[in-house]
Image: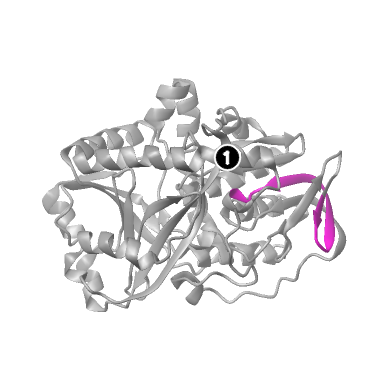
């Protein structure tokens, strides 16, 4: 489902209001040739394009709207390791060998992100450190297990904080403890995408915005058609995620766009440092979680909730303000300058879907709300596979792609019913 926004400009948000300057990127016109055509200029597509361009490929990137227009430019900006279903769940469902193979890559996406930011001097307001905050004793025990799990898969430096220690990091009485991941952190997500796009172009890559793909003609060389042009390429990488629409029905049938909401408060001045003295990002351990952090200009950015089927709420502030004020009652009545929504793509398993629609048409989709780090890894895996190095790509490709019960018609109500059950569990502790 494509949101009803002007594809020629970013939907109104705090991020769009302080984005990086960008060059004009005219729509594709006429026929062009490329080694690889990437569809979608979010993190997955940009990561793939950068990796391929660095390897000497001729890469052309098509975007139906603007660079970072979708989830990559509207998300919480939180650098969170691993996957939406963690390695213990993967081991229970798919075995120890699969968990070990995915565990070897579980922390790579964040490293790729930081490498790109450092190498290309991307001004995306990168900060280190992320907190997972426990609201109940059960969640606190879960964080202890979480620490052991990630350490077993090679991530060191995690710190478990008790109630007093977490209170020094977050000025809220809601949390019993937290797990601090120094390798986590947060960024201005739209600036990150825009900086990656500029780096790709500086390396010789080409981006065409306002170039929605209308059909893909398969063959030894793939022809990718837009309203005004056509790209003939040896390989095509589909990286549209929640904004791929019905271009490939086989992908749409096994995924569901979901909306999440965020607000940005008025600038808080010195109060901001009192709320989050360590300037870490925070997410709680509920199934329907809240997440928040500070912006570079001392606003609180707060998000939470899920709208199944990508239906925008009438007023984002009405959804988010009660959550914000539960965490920080000292901000009751605070001014909210921006509210916005964005879609992410959910899979039934909550694990990414990776594979081939043809030998030379590859895809990755379904980050399931865990996309900032995974999408950067996915881009690298797509690039490796396009260059004939498919071993790591196949680790994800062999995961089953499960259809939603009831098909596309009933996937949203079934998912909402499941979410209501988990929300009840959250409330009961």
Quadrant of the rendered image containing residue 197: bottom right
In the rendered image, the quadrant that contains the C terminus is top left
Residue 168 at x, y percent in the picture: 16, 59
Residue 84 visible, this angle = yes
Answer whether residue 346 is magenta in the image: no
Residue underneath mark 1: 408
Q: Which residues are magenta?
A: 224-241
Residue pictured at 35% horizontal, 31% vertical: 152
Mark 1 crowdedness (10 Å alpha carbons): few <14, some 14-19, many ≥20: some
In the picture provided, is 388 more to the left or to the right than 174?
Answer: right
Name the one closer to the observer, 126 or 328: 328
- Disc 1, SS: helix
Q: Nearer the viewer, residue 135 or 149?
A: 135
Number of numbered discs on residues: 1
Colour pattern of the rendering: one colour
Residue 81, picture quadrant: top left
Q: Position of residue 267 (x, y in %)?
A: 31, 78
**Residue 29 as seen in the image, left or right of residue 412:** right
* Residue at the image position 27 percent from the left and 33 percent from the top: 145
- Give the residue drawn at x 21%, y 70%: 331
- x, y percentage for residue 330? 17, 69
What secondary structure do most residues of the magenta stretch adopt? strand
Q: Is residue 239 magenta?
A: yes
Residue at image position (84%, 66%) is: 29
Q: Is residue 57 above or below residue 105?
A: below
Q: From this viewpoint, is residue 294 visible?
A: no
Q: Is residue 270 above or below residue 159?
A: below
Q: Position of residue 394 (x, y in %)?
A: 62, 30
């Amino acid at each position: 489902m494509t949101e009803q926004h002007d594809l020629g400009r970013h939907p109104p948000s705090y991020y769009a209001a302080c984005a990086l300057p960008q060059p004009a990127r005219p729509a594709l016109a006429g026929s062009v040739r490329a080694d690889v055509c990437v569809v979608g200029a979010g993190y997955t597509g940009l990561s793939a394009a950068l990796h391929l361009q660095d390897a000497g490929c001729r890469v052309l990137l098509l975007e139906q709207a603007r660079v970072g227009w979708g989830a990559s430019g509207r998300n919480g900006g939180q650098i969170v390791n691993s996957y939406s279903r963690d390695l213990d769940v993967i081991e229970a469902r798919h075995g120890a060998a699969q968990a070990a193979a995915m565990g070897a890559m579980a922390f790579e996406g964040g490293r790729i992100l930081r490498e790109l930011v450092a190498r290309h001097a991307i001004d995306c307001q990168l900060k280190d450190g992320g907190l997972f905050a426990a609201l109940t004793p059960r969640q606190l025990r879960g964080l202890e297990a979480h620490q052991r799990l990630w350490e077993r898969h090679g991530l060191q430096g995690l710190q478990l904080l008790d109630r007093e220690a977490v209170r020094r990091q977050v000025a809220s009485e809601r949390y019993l403890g937290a797990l601090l991941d120094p390798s986590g952190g947060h960024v201005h997500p739209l600036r990150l995408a825009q900086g990656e796009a500029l780096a790709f172009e500086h390396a010789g890559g080409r981006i065409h915005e306002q170039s929605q793909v209308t059909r893909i003609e398969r063959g030894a060389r793939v022809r990718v058609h837009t309203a005004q042009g056509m790209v003939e390429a040896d390989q095509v990488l589909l990286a549209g995620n929640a904004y791929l629409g019905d271009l490939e029905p086989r992908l749409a049938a096994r995924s569901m766009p979901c909306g999440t909401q965020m607000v940005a408060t008025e600038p808080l001045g010195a109060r901001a440092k009192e709320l989050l003295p360590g300037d870490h990002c925070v997410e709680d351990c509920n199934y329907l979680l809240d997440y928040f952090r500070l912006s570079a200009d001392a606003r609180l950015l707060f998000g939470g909730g899920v709208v199944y089927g990508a239906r925008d709420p009438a007023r984002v502030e009405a959804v988010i303000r009660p959550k914000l004020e539960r965490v920080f009652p000292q901000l009751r009545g605070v001014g909210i300058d921006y509210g916005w929504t964005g879609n992410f793509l959910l899979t039934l398993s909550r694990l990414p879907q990776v594979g081939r629609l043809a030998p030379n048409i590859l895809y990755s989709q379904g980050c399931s709300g865990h996309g900032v780090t995974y999408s950067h890894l996915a881009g690298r895996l797509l690039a490796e596979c396009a260059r004939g190095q498919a071993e790591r790509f196949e680790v994800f490709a062999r995961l089953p792609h499960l259809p939603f019960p009831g098909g596309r018609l009933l996937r949203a109500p079934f998912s909402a019913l499941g979410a209501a059950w988990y929300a009840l569990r959250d409330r009961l502790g």
